[in-house]
Amino acid sequence: MLIVMRHGATDAEIQRVVAVIEELGYKASPMPGAQRTAVGLVGNDGRVDASRLEALPGVQEIIHVSKPYKQVSREWKGENTVVRLPGGVAVGGTEVVAIAGPCSVESERQILEAARQVREAGAVILRGGAWKPRTSPYAFQGLGRPGLQLLAKARDETGLLICTEAMDPEGVGYVAEVADIIQIGARNMQNSSLLKAAGRAKKPVLLKRGLSATIEELLLSAEYLLAEGNHAVILCERGIRGFDTATRNVFDLTAIPVVHKLSHLPIVADPSHGTGLRLSDGAQSLFPDQFAQLMREVRVIAEVIGRRVAEPASVSA
Amino acid sequence: MLIVMRHGATDAEIQRVVAVIEELGYKASPMPGAQRTAVGLVGNDGRVDASRLEALPGVQEIIHVSKPYKQVSREWKGENTVVRLPGGVAVGGTEVVAIAGPCSVESERQILEAARQVREAGAVILRGGAWKPRTSPYAFQGLGRPGLQLLAKARDETGLLICTEAMDPEGVGYVAEVADIIQIGARNMQNSSLLKAAGRAKKPVLLKRGLSATIEELLLSAEYLLAEGNHAVILCERGIRGFDTATRNVFDLTAIPVVHKLSHLPIVADPSHGTGLRLSDGAQSLFPDQFAQLMREVRVIAEVIGRRVAEPASVSA
Amino acid sequence: MLIVMRHGATDAEIQRVVAVIEELGYKASPMPGAQRTAVGLVGNDGRVDASRLEALPGVQEIIHVSKPYKQVSREWKGENTVVRLPGGVAVGGTEVVAIAGPCSVESERQILEAARQVREAGAVILRGGAWKPRTSPYAFQGLGRPGLQLLAKARDETGLLICTEAMDPEGVGYVAEVADIIQIGARNMQNSSLLKAAGRAKKPVLLKRGLSATIEELLLSAEYLLAEGNHAVILCERGIRGFDTATRNVFDLTAIPVVHKLSHLPIVADPSHGTGLRLSDGAQSLFPDQFAQLMREVRVIAEVIGRRVAEPASVSA
Amino acid sequence: MLIVMRHGATDAEIQRVVAVIEELGYKASPMPGAQRTAVGLVGNDGRVDASRLEALPGVQEIIHVSKPYKQVSREWKGENTVVRLPGGVAVGGTEVVAIAGPCSVESERQILEAARQVREAGAVILRGGAWKPRTSPYAFQGLGRPGLQLLAKARDETGLLICTEAMDPEGVGYVAEVADIIQIGARNMQNSSLLKAAGRAKKPVLLKRGLSATIEELLLSAEYLLAEGNHAVILCERGIRGFDTATRNVFDLTAIPVVHKLSHLPIVADPSHGTGLRLSDGAQSLFPDQFAQLMREVRVIAEVIGRRVAEPASVSA
């Protein structure tokens, strides 16, 4: 921690900062510069009460050298977290795992058909909302618990794993009973009641980055999950809000290597919103044959960069 | 609704759009221009299925002339909504209503002292969190239900009304029992489970704008409350996320007249984050005497623009 | 053009709008809806004076169906513009053209060494600033005209083409004499004096998108160039300003297909800022061997998607 | 300057950083913490070459304690700069100075009429563009030098001072001959050729903040002017780009106190874009009687906060 003094701070003010640091049980290291003096606090164990120093006369700014998150950080755990799912699928290793499916579960026929198509093309996880967070109260809010049953049926028939969203603490219980991955949506990234409930669930969590969340905020939300004991966390970059309404969202490509530097958690890319054009022929979804073509290209490119696409489990007849 | 055709769309494509509009039971009105033809849909009663038109060959874009919200709009209700609170306080009329208090309830002594000070200075509503949405799981999360009891005590002693935050559907029940206004925080503006629960509560709701929410999204979240039957809704502009970390948030002054144009709901300004400087002497809070000075200036300025500051109720001894 | 009336606009107000449209020589087509009436203006030839309609009583909003740019649009010219450069290099066709080089020209030795390395790795165009737009007046501002001579020398020795920035109308003259492509930087995207000068130059122009420019604004800046007679324009997406300082800029991937939809002009991706990490080992530049590795991967991926990487011209001994 | 080491940096890496700091002629002060060690550089005189330290093994980040601007900073000059204009008008003191006028000079009749109206209402400086930076090449670009003559005539007739924009180095010469204040527009805030020319002019400069410029970037652009010898600089906050197209721009109110903390230069508020509603009756301009009403309210409010509105000079008959 660095206590930056104002330009023109008096010696007495600097000495006061030094004295308070020492009272708190740390060592102070003043560093005079041409414009101002900064006082380093040596031996910070993460429990320094900055507000006490901030309020001292002559103090301009406190610079925190350490990050506010802990268990999600690379420094807490150096090796990558690999989230292992039923059937041998692993997220965070070298395999490229494709998650696909419709926005919401609408009917048995629709979800079974979609499941077969995405499995055929090469997805291993089926997504689809039983509950949907919607901007408007008049939009379809999902089938609810019957939708979960339809997802379970699609899993039985195709061998795909299921990823679906929980929207409140009560819903976490229902989703955790059925799904393989509990999704927390972008609108709920800072819903701390929901994060705590998901942190106590016994299933992996896919945590989507909020529309205007910084990477630090995303990691702090993940920290809620780990702090409650759930270490099987998959982050998800899905595009952020920009200033140009010609595009729906801006997919923040760089977030992925930045997260890899800062955290051991895996992060998946959800390009559906961030690259979907408002101007395109019918919103951001792909038709089945477009998805199949995409997966063919992904397979070749994965090889070029030394990876391979994960295959779905076979269904026992 | 306006169906904009691509440049070079054929006559057959335009005729197809006209035919589908008529099949849907509306009238079509083609408008050829120098660059492209647009087809107006006449008689839109808000139930047109745009996706059917969007998918037709030659269609470039659908422009919605109507807004997606209904009951919150000025067109649904022309006169201003005035939210009436106990003791004759009204939000949305000509009186300037001051809401003040600490970030969270920490102890009986702290909240009673704060209540007396803000009442003295001229506030009529006491704010303070019993539950606090925090970015970090390691930050103080609030006293919970005992905090609500301390707020009730502060009301008894000072006559101030109480505004405090609910963070999940279960919490809405507890807050509604005690508070005069249920607050929904910025991080939860699109938490639809919470909005639905607050919409069924029998207390007024203060709905804060999310950090990167558009005004349309704020109004759609308010629509959730009205759609559930709660019409006593106060909107709150509290600053939005900008690109410059030298300031915490950007207070979006213009949002206030824009909301007045679009909606009949009252909107209050919460300048604490949007004008709080990262560079200032100790975060964004005011000391008691700064608040008192501010209220003295507000009283004079209110008069200049033909308004007056609301006074707190007297407490019967 | 669509003239949207306020909810509750009177018949007389609507009739007035119709009358003014007809006076202006166009046909009016009123479209009543459940919430409001909109009046279509039929036959718009791009010369309608909207302000006259905007000011009429009862008018809420004017919606422009046509885009404000002309010559850069797909509708003006359907086929892709291919910018042909000396030595048979073409930007905008199926070849992948790599542009590389240092930020600025610093010395003969530095630029010749850099030129050889990027040519070796597979670049065909050498970039490097003789003048540099800098945020601070105390940062190195470039060698100026002697820097241009060093670039010319690097071209002679390697066969690479030269792309370098002009920063004011006077500089356009100097750059156009020497360079193969005149670059207009992000900070100058809306410098109209510079755009006009570059529009009169006889060399292709690489126009970078401003840090917070919308795609429409980028296209309007390109329109300045075409309006002055220069049709050899290459657009460049280089990342936009976001809200998270953990990344320098956000590379706006989606801008590329959006530009392809809206315009016939080629657009190149400059990933150096948008994907450069503030946290990385030494800013956003690649070391020569990293660039060579990148180009090897690009060659394979280009093939997968049916393209190939352009090769530099050979230098006659 | 603080050199933050990676978590797990070895003692040898830390010692290497210390050795390099000492080689550079400064003192090193290592500060071990629970997560990582940081090394303070003591005695920084603003000439440390950070890139040399950044490249050392084990270094994660360099934190600059000093700001990159110098002469514009409060630390360079503690007292407020007051820019004194002809006729005794001073910007940066206690007087509230109103600047008003049309977007551009269109004709003698128009500018003289506007000048009389704004003077009547209480403005002391007339603004109006002879050259206008426009997003589209097809929009009116201004009358040019004849427009400057009309502004001079308006000054002769009303006693108002003249503020008008220069758009390139050549234009600075023409504007400086006639105007009392040379304006640099938002689009040109980082046009360094223009800044350098204005820095050599003998007239005060009004520098507008760019649409997405940080406060630090605004101050660095002002530093260009001071570095060239022009100390009569007035900054201008005019609204920044946000994400919600329902408002044109977001007026960044907090920028004003932040600039006051960081710099001695005066800053004026230009609310015309930042508070202008896209939804309003006819763009962001005020009608003359609205401006007069505004000035009446400003006069009373100025008094409440201990200031007064500046009066225009009288014209000798």
Image: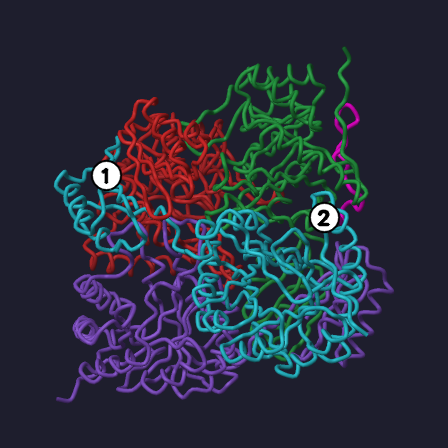
Chain colours: A red, B green, C purple, D cyan
Q: Residues within 10 Å of mark 1 (few under 14, many from 20)?
A: many
Q: Is residue B82 shown in magenta?
A: yes
User: Dot 2: what SS?
Assistant: helix
The subunit carrying tag 2 is D
In the picture, measured across the screen, residue C168 lies left or right of residue D273, that is left
Q: Amino acid under label 2?
A: Ala
Residue closer to the observer: C8 or C68: C68
Determine the image quadrant of residue B264. Answer: top right
Q: Residues within 10 Å of mark 2 (few under 14, many from 20)?
A: some
**For mark 2, what is the residue?**
D302
The subunit carrying tag 1 is D
Per the picture, the main secondary structure of the magenta-coloured stretch is loop
The residue most toward the right is C12
Earlier sequence position, callout 2 versus callout 1: 1
User: Dot 1: what SS?
Assistant: strand
Report the quarter where the C terminus of chain B lies: top right
Residue closer to the observer: C64 or D93: D93
Q: Amino acid under label 1?
A: Ser
Q: Position of residue D140 (x, y in %)?
A: 63, 78
Determine the image quadrant of residue D27. Answer: top left
**For mark 1, what is the residue?**
D29
Q: Against D48, is A93 above or below?
A: above
The residue most toward the top is B317
Residue at image position (51%, 19%) is: B143
Determine the image quadrant of residue A262. Answer: top left
Residue at image position (61%, 70%) is: B16
Q: Are marks 2 and 1 on the same chain?
A: yes
Q: Is residue C224 shown in magenta?
A: no
**Mark sitting on residue A63:** none
* Residue span colored magenta: B74-91
Q: Against B16, is C194 above or below?
A: below
Residue closer to the observer: D263 or C220: D263
